[in-house]
Image: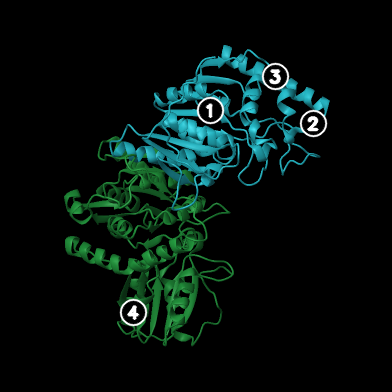
Amino acid sequence: MKKVITGNQAVAYGVILSRVEVISAYPITPQTTIVEELSELIANGRLNTRFLKVESEHSAMAALIGASTGGVRVFTATSSHGLAYMHEMLHWASGARLPIVMVNVNRAIGPGWNIWNDQSDSVSQRDTGWVQLYCENNQEVLDTILQAYRIAESVRLPVMVVLDAFVLSHTSEPVQVPSIEEVDQFLPAFYPEYILDTKEPTAFSMITTPEHFFEFRYKIQKAMEQVPEISKKVDMEFKSLFGRGYGAIEKYGSEKAEVFLMTSGTVTSTSRMVIQKLLDQGLSVGGIKVKRFRPFPVEEICEALGEAKKVAVIDRNLSAGVGGIFAQELKASLYSRGRRPGVFGFISGLGGRDITPELIEEAVLYTWEHPQPEEEILWLGLKK
Amino acid sequence: MKKMEIPLSENLGCGHLACAGCGAAISMRLALKALGEKTVLVIPASCWSIIPGSWPYSSFRVNVIHAGFVTGGATASGVRAALDIRGDHESVVAVWAGDGGTFDIGIQALSGAAERNEDFIYICNDNEGYMNTGTQRSSATPYLAWTTTTPVRQPKENPKKDIMAIMADHQIPYAATATIAYPEDFLRKMEKAKGIRGTRFIHLLSPCPPGWRIASELVVKLSRLAVRTRVFPLYEVENGRTYTLQEEPHVTPVKEYLKLQGRFSHLTEKDIEETQRRVDDTWERLLRRARC
């Protein structure tokens, strides 16, 4: 059924269709309409789900750790300060190998208080052992949640589904909402390998000495390394059932472009238009949308770049002292390759400032015209 | 003399890493007798994170989830929700946290869970300080006690936080104090808690030989003296309203309790008098609450 819904409503539909059994969440703008929608749906008897309305995000994640250890499918959503507050428990979730799925609605972290779109919240959780998937539109949001459970439950790692504040969370778009019967075919009930059962006493998350701890972390890395193959398989299966697929990245524009533009989230939608305009003007340009940020799709991106000379990266986040995180990840990926296109790292749209078609065009043309960047960090749309 | 009636069943295996005479070890053994086999223990960071041993060995014969320091109330809420969804309403979820994990860093998650009246038993093993990290003061540390962060020249100035009043005022169905010197009373309270649904809180006083600077054989004696001196009265509160006091007929001066503990060895006569005055005052406060 096609519905006109916001990104946050798409999240709620994704959660219902995934037959989530325990939800635990704390409200924060711009995530709030997710928890409101879920509360309504549960109150209407649409879900056989327990919703723990906890007193903080830290407790939201801790409660899911308890519930997921108890062997049920779980969900939470947060943003910004809420995600930062969860940080300790994010490590715990991956360390305990729990297939938790969380939505993070990208929002800047204060001060000053800012509720608008900015990826600094999610990218600063990149080392917590979570898979991270970024979405471009509301359809992708719903679809990614369904896929996230399959990935999480296959590799026993938590997955964060990320969408832009307001641009998606509070903006309505037509979304194809599958029936629960269709989703059941794609996402079967969750039967974990290790389950809490008082008939068979087990100790979880025990103290682990230097003799063993190292190997547990090695196994997390090995599980991460399975993600590209598993998510590809999941995506192909999803495509055969629903006719939509996303890949770890998506390439558009000229197949063998000289200059590529790399983006994530909704900036990609605007970029598609800009790239098309420049193609029409005869420039050899193309776009790469990065959907999967963790594990970073090194192979896919390097293959997509082909013989390209330069890549412009637009980061809606800032790691002060370094620059944009997607640009850093790209540079690290390219280092061991024979062919290394020049990386132009642009920072734009912090704290929700619009990244307009003009700014994107400016970034691509700058990259086209300069043999190398004049600065390590190129500021796009900065008031001087 | 009446024969003690303690169940023979054991849900704690042989061998653990507690210090000699540890009050928490005896308490856990007794608590598990009452809780029974169908128990899921949630243990936020505390002495009992260490005591059962390290992976892959554990002295527990029941399920245990070790949890983040702050998270006792929250993790247990999630475990309970999962068991309920799976149709297991029989198994008991019990948190075992220290005073740090209860009075201090974990109070938010505990208060949240108690307000939601989550269905679990929360046992606070109160050894009156951060003993697992080498005896630092917590908000459960008593007035004038020495710890490594309240040296004798600047001992703790503030009274111990009244966690029972805080928990009772959440209007949870059951809150009780207990100690191993009165094992039948402790077991009775555990059994009673087990028979109730909703958030149940047990405040256990748990003398700590290294942290209190006491001989290991004094743990039970000090547990008893804590009750007799009214430093740690035994009582129950139902629904935040109905108080039942287990009054100790042999009331003893606080000095008898203090003088056996190295952590109070710097106290002057004046300090002891002031401590006595405060204990009497707190007792009166409890009686006033109980009479209301």
What residue sits right under mark 4 in the picture?
A304
Residue at 53% across, 28% down:
B167
| Label 3 crowd (10 A; few <14 / some 14-19 / many >=20) | few
Q: Which mark is residue B147?
A: none
What residue sits right under mark 3 in the picture?
B281
Q: What amino acid is at disc 2?
A: Leu
The numbered mark 3 sits on a residue in which chain? Answer: B
* Real-space CA distance between mark 4 and mark 3, rounded to the nearest whole angstrom: 76 Å
Tags 3 and 2 on a common chain: yes
The spot of residue A233 in percent (x, y) is: 25, 66
Considering the numbered disc 4 on the image, is that residue within a helix, a strand or a loop?
helix
Q: Nearer the viewer, mark 4 or mark 2?
A: 2
The numbered mark 1 sits on a residue in which chain? Answer: B
Residue at 52% across, 60% down:
A210
Colour of chain A as rendered: green
Q: Which mark is residue B167?
A: 1
What residue sits right under mark 2 in the picture?
B267
Q: Nearer the viewer, mark 1 or mark 2?
A: 2
Camera sees residue A63: yes
Q: Quadrant of residue B255?
A: top right
| In the image, residue B125 above or below residue B69 | above
Q: Nearer the viewer, mark 3 or mark 2?
A: 2
Nearest to the observer: residue A271 or residue A219: A219
Q: What amino acid is at disc 1?
A: Met
Asked if the residue under mark 3 is in contact with the one under mark 4, i.e. CB atoms within 8 Å, the reply is no
The spot of residue A120 in percent (x, y) is: 49, 61
